[in-house]
């Protein structure tokens, strides 16, 4: 069951990363109801949330949430101690504090520019979060943390952007980064690599072989005629008279 939950969480996170530009560390906005549910279910948020989301997280809250928990008294004292350990994000209600649910919803207005996750057990807040495209929703059920699947409004927003050809800010940043890497639009064009062409055969190997001259059949006959002529000349010549040698005395 745990592997199945993490598989679903990985799939939902991929949706928000590719379409809305979510990156680590993930910023999680928690309200008092979520902290109270974690306290009752003995859920260790700092340990379990990074393992469940498979990445680094930053647990955050607002001053309005802390003041609301403080005003509720001893019943939510434990939840207040948990929320006080988180980072406090500045909201627009510095002078006049509002309810925690109203403050959280104001933090994700204008398209959730800071890429917040919202962690709450309040059904009213969850319904309003789902109507805002690009806001992941976390809740606790049966003492386990669950990342809700993308809302119909989020999927409809992505489909509409794809059909109309609109490009989100996150996608524009990716395109600009790719252009810089390729050297496009910066005045410098990427160097074209010269393709190595296949070399031709050795030109010397293409030359035709010289044919050997066949021996002339008339050569033996010419040699025979030459010999006959020499014999005839020798017959006509008189032999040279050799001088007589003096006889030796006995």
Image (tube, rainbow, N blue to C red):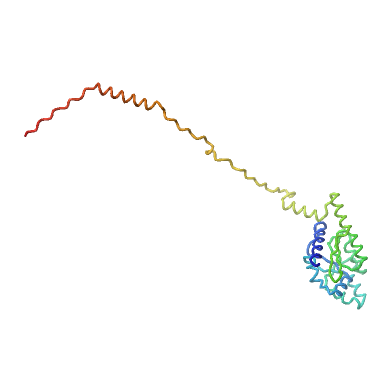
Query: In the picture shown, does residue 59 fall above or below 196?
Result: below
Whole-percent x, y for residue 69 in the image: 90, 73
Residue 232 image-quadrant placement: top left
Describe residue 231's horizontal placement relative to residue 28 as left or right.
left
Query: In the picture shown, does residue 32 fall above or below 16?
Result: below
Q: How many marks?
A: 0
Residue 25 image-quadrant placement: bottom right
- Where, quadrant-wise, is the C terminus in this rendering? top left
Q: Residue at x 85, y 74 (%)?
A: 41
Q: Residue at x 42, y 30 (%)?
A: 215
Whole-percent x, y for residue 223 in the image: 35, 26
Q: Residue at x 54, y 40 (%)?
A: 202
Whole-percent x, y for residue 95 in the image: 91, 69
**Is 95 in front, or is 240?**
240
Describe residue 157's horizontal placement relative to residue 194 as left or right.
right
Q: Residue at x 84, y 49 (%)?
A: 165
- Residue extending farthest to the bottom is 74
- Where, quadrant-wise, is the N terminus in this rendering? bottom right
């Amino acid at each position: 069951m745990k592997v199945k939950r993490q598989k679903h969480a990985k799939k939902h996170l991929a949706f928000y990363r590719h379409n809305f530009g979510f990156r680590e560390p993930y910023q999680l906005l928690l309200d008092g109801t979520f902290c109270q549910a974690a306290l009752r279910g003995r859920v260790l948020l700092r340990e379990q949330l990074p393992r469940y989301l498979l990445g680094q997280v930053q647990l955050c809250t607002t001053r309005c949430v802390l003041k609301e928990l403080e005003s509720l008294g001893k019943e939510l004292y434990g939840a207040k101690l948990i929320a006080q350990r988180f980072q406090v994000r500045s909201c627009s209600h510095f002078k006049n504090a509002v309810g925690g649910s109203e403050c959280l919803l104001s933090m994700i207005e204008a398209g959730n520019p800071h890429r917040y996750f919202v962690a709450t057990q309040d059904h009213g807040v969850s319904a309003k979060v789902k109507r805002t495209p690009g806001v992941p929703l976390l809740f606790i059920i049966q003492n386990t943390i669950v990342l809700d699947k993308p809302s119909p409004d989020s999927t409809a927003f992505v489909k509409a952007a794809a059909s109309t050809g609109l490009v989100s800010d996150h996608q524009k940043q990716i395109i600009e980064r790719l252009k810089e890497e390729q050297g496009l639009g910066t005045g410098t064009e990427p160097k074209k690599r010269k393709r190595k062409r296949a070399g031709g055969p050795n030109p010397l190997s293409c030359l035709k072989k010289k044919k050997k001259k066949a021996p002339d059949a008339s050569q033996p006959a010419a040699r025979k005629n030459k010999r006959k002529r020499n014999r005839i000349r020798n017959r006509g010549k008189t032999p040279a008279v050799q001088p007589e040698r003096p006889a030796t005395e006995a």
